[in-house]
C-alpha cells in the first residue's frame, strides 16, 4: 500500500470540506493503539474544520437527516474509517472514551493552538471557531510532509488570550459560567433551558462569540445551534 502524501490526504479530505490540521510523530509514551497490521504509527494527522466550512457537506449527508443519534460523529466515522482502511491506518475519534484521547494536547503538537479561558483551544487564525473530527494514525510518513506546516513567527509567539484587552469572553456569559480556570457546565446547561438562554441556543455561546479572534470563522447560526442543542442533550459527542 502506498503511503499518502500530505497533498494526497488534503485532496481526499477536501471532498468533504474537511481540513488537514497538521500532524505529529508519536512516541511509545503516547500509548496509541496498534495499526491493523500490528505495527506502530509513524505519523498522526489531525483532521477537523475551521468555521462552518464542512456544515454544507455534513448537513446534506444522509447522517444529518436519518433521525439517529450523533449524526456528526457518525458522518465523521464514515469518512475517517474509509480513509484509514484505504491507507492501512487507524482513525481515532475525539468522542471515543472515557478515557479520551488528548486531542487538545495533540492539537498543540500540530498547529499553533493555545489554551484559552474558554477551555477550548484558540487558534491565531480561526480563533475559537474550530474543532477536530478525527485523527488518522498512518504507518508511513512521506519525507518533508511535516515540515510544510510552518507558521509565521509572530503568530506562534503571540500569547493571544493574555494579550487580549479586557478578555471580553469572561464578561459576556449571562451566568458567569467561565472563571478563566473552570467552566460550570451545569450552570451553563440550566441557563440554556430558560427563555433568556435562547440567544445562546439559537446563535451560539455568547462568551465564545465575544472573542475578537478569528471572527470571520464564527459559526453560521444553523451550525452553532446544532452544537448548542447537542451540547445540551449529551455529555460529549456532537456537542463538540
Ligand atoms: C468531555 C468533553 C467535554 C465535556 C467536558 C469538557 C472539560 N473541559 O472537561 C463537555 C460536555 C462539558 C464539553 C463541552 C464542550 N466542548 Co468538549 N470535549 C470533551 C472531550 C470529548 C474530552 C475532553 C477530555 O477529557 N480529554 C482528555 C484529556 C486528557 O485531553 P487534553 O487534550 O489534555 O484536554 C484537556 C485539557 O486541554 C483541558 N483544557 C483545555 N483548555 C483548558 C484551559 C484551562 C484554563 C484549563 C484549566 C484546562 C484546559 O481540558 C481538556 C479536557 O479536560 C474533548 C475531545 C478530546 N478527546 O479531547 C472535547 C473537546 C475538548 N470539546 C470541544 C468543544 C468545541 C466543546 C464545546 C465548545 C462544544 C460546543 N458547545 O460547541 C463545549 C464547551 C466547552 C467548554 N467551554 O469547556 C473541542 C475543543 C476544540 C478546540 N477548539 O479546542 C474538543 C477537542 C472536541 C472536538 N471534536 O474538537 N466537552
Image: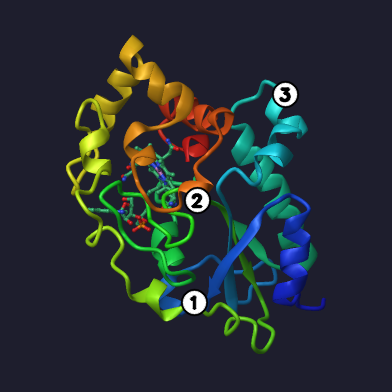
Callouts 3 and 2 close, C-beta under 8 Å? no
Residue 41 visible in the current orientation: no
- Which residue in the structure is indicated by mark 3? 66
Q: Is residue 36 left or right of residue 94?
A: right
Label 2 packing within 10 angstroms: few (<14), some (14-19), many (20+): many
From what the image shows, is residue 167 above or below residue 231? below
First in sequence: mark 3 vs mark 2: 3
Mark 3 vs mark 2, foreground winner is: 2
- Which residue in the structure is indicated by mark 2? 130
Callouts 2 and 1 close, C-beta under 8 Å? no
Answer yes or no: disc 2 within 8 Å of ligand 1.
yes
Mark identifier at residue 121: none
On the image, the x and y values in percent for residue 63 come to: 71, 32
First in sequence: mark 1 vs mark 3: 3
Task: State the separation of the CA atoms marked 3 and 2.
Answer: 25 Å
Which quarter shows the N terminus? Answer: bottom right
Report the front residue among 10 and 168: 168
Mark identifier at residue 151: 1
On the image, the x and y values in percent for residue 160 come to: 31, 62
Residue ranking furthest to the bottom = 143
Report the front residue among 160 and 83: 160
Residue 142 visible in the current orientation: yes
Residue ranking furthest to the front = 165
Q: Quadrant of residue 148?
A: bottom right
Residue at 50% across, 67% down: 32
Residue at 60% across, 26% down: 69
Residue at 27% across, 58% down: 161
Callouts 1 and 3 close, C-beta under 8 Å? no
On the image, the x and y values in percent for residue 77 come to: 66, 46
Secondary element under disc 3, as helix, strand or loop, is: loop
From what the image shows, is residue 190 above or below residue 153? above
Amino acid at each position: 500500500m502506498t503511503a499518502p502524501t500530505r497533498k494526497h490526504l488534503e485532496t481526499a479530505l477536501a471532498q468533504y470540506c474537511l481540513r488537514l490540521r497538521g500532524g505529529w510523530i508519536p512516541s511509545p509514551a503516547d500509548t496509541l493503539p496498534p495499526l491493523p497490521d500490528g505495527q506502530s504509527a509513524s505519523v498522526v494527522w489531525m483532521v477537523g474544520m475551521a468555521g462552518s466550512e464542512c456544515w454544507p457537506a455534513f448537513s446534506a449527508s444522509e447522517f444529518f437527516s436519518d433521525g439517529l443519534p450523533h449524526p456528526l460523529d457518525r458522518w465523521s466515522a464514515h469518512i475517517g474509517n474509509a480513509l484509514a482502511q484505504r491507507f492501512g491506518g487507524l482513525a481515532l475519534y475525539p468522542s471515543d472514551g472515557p478515557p479520551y484521547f488528548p486531542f487538545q494536547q495533540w492539537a498543540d503538537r500540530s498547529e499553533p493552538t493555545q489554551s484559552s479561558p474558554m477551555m477550548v483551544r484558540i487558534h491565531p487564525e480561526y480563533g475559537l471557531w474550530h474543532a477536530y473530527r478525527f485523527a488518522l494514525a498512518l504507518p508511513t510518513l512521506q519525507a518533508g510532509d511535516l515540515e510544510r506546516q510552518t507558521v509565521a513567527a509572530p503568530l506562534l509567539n503571540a500569547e493571544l488570550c493574555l494579550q487580549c484587552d479586557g478578555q471580553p469572553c469572561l464578561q459576556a456569559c449571562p451566568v458567569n459560567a467561565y472563571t478563566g480556570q473552570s467552566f460550570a457546565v451545569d450552570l451553563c446547561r440550566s441557563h440554556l433551558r430558560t427563555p433568556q438562554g435562547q440567544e445562546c441556543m439559537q446563535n451560539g455561546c455568547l462568551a465564545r462569540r465575544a472573542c475578537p479572534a478569528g471572527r470571520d470563522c464564527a459559526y453560521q447560526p444553523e451550525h452553532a445551534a446544532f452544537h448548542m442543542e447537542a451540547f445540551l442533550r449529551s455529555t460529549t459527542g456532537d456537542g463538540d
